[in-house]
Amino acid sequence: MKLNPYLMFNGQCEHAFKFYEQCLGGKITAMMTYGEAPEPETVEQTPPEWRSKIMHTSLKFGDQELMGSDSPPDYYEEAKGFSVSISLNDPAEAERIFHTLAENGTVRMPFQQTFWAYRFGMLVDQFGIPWMVNCDQAI
């Protein structure tokens, strides 16, 4: 079994995933718009202004995957009740990722030492996605 986060956006999925690709590394391996759907009825039922929005995308990091799409406007709900968690052993890389994700977002807990981690912080990024960045003791 494998669990993969699937993030829903309100029209900014492409921008978010290109940002995550730069910030986190990895490679976008798939990105399909609603207008590129293989079923003609899907395209026909999609409002013209929404056809350039993302129906599905995938960002791979080795054997891990982060997926997402733009939720149709009537179905979009803000992210709440979860966080995407990143764990690293490199303090400099963990700090870089935390501060990059925090750009134009909201820091909920500053990146700092805790009783369980060398560094830990929480934020909501500019796209409304909550993140936790954890760095165990540097080895």
Image (cartoon, helix red, strand yellow):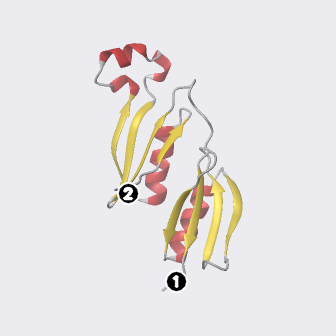
What residue would you read off at disc 1?
A: 138
Neighbor class of circle 2 (other Cα within 10 Å; few <14, some 14-19, many 20+) is some
Side of 95 where 29 appears, left or right: left
Residue 53, image x and y in percent?
46, 29
Badge nearest the viewer, 2 or 1: 1
Residue 70, image x and y in percent?
49, 33
Instruction: Find out whether the residues at labels 2 and 1 contact each other: C-beta distance under 8 Å.
Output: no
- The residue sitting at 33% across, 25% down in the picture is 37
Secondary structure under tag 1 reads loop
Residue 54, image x and y in percent?
43, 33
Side of 25 where 92 appears, left or right: right
Where is 137 relative to 129, above or below?
below
- The residue sitting at 59% across, 52% down in the picture is 82
Separation of residues labelled 2 and 1 (CA atoms): 23 Å
- The residue sitting at 38% across, 13% down in the picture is 44
Q: Quadrant of residue 116?
A: bottom right
Neighbor class of circle 1 (other Cα within 10 Å; few <14, some 14-19, many 20+) is few
Residue 129, image x and y in percent?
59, 48
Q: Which of 58 and 16 is in front in this view?
A: 58
Where is 118 relative to 47, above or below?
below
Q: Quadrant of residue 101?
A: bottom right
Residue type at mark 1: give it: Ala
Residue type at mark 2: give it: Gly
Q: Which of 38 and 100 is in front in this view?
A: 38
Secondary structure under tag 2 reads loop
Q: Quadrant of the N terminus?
A: bottom left
Residue, far front: 1
What residue would you read off at disc 2?
A: 26
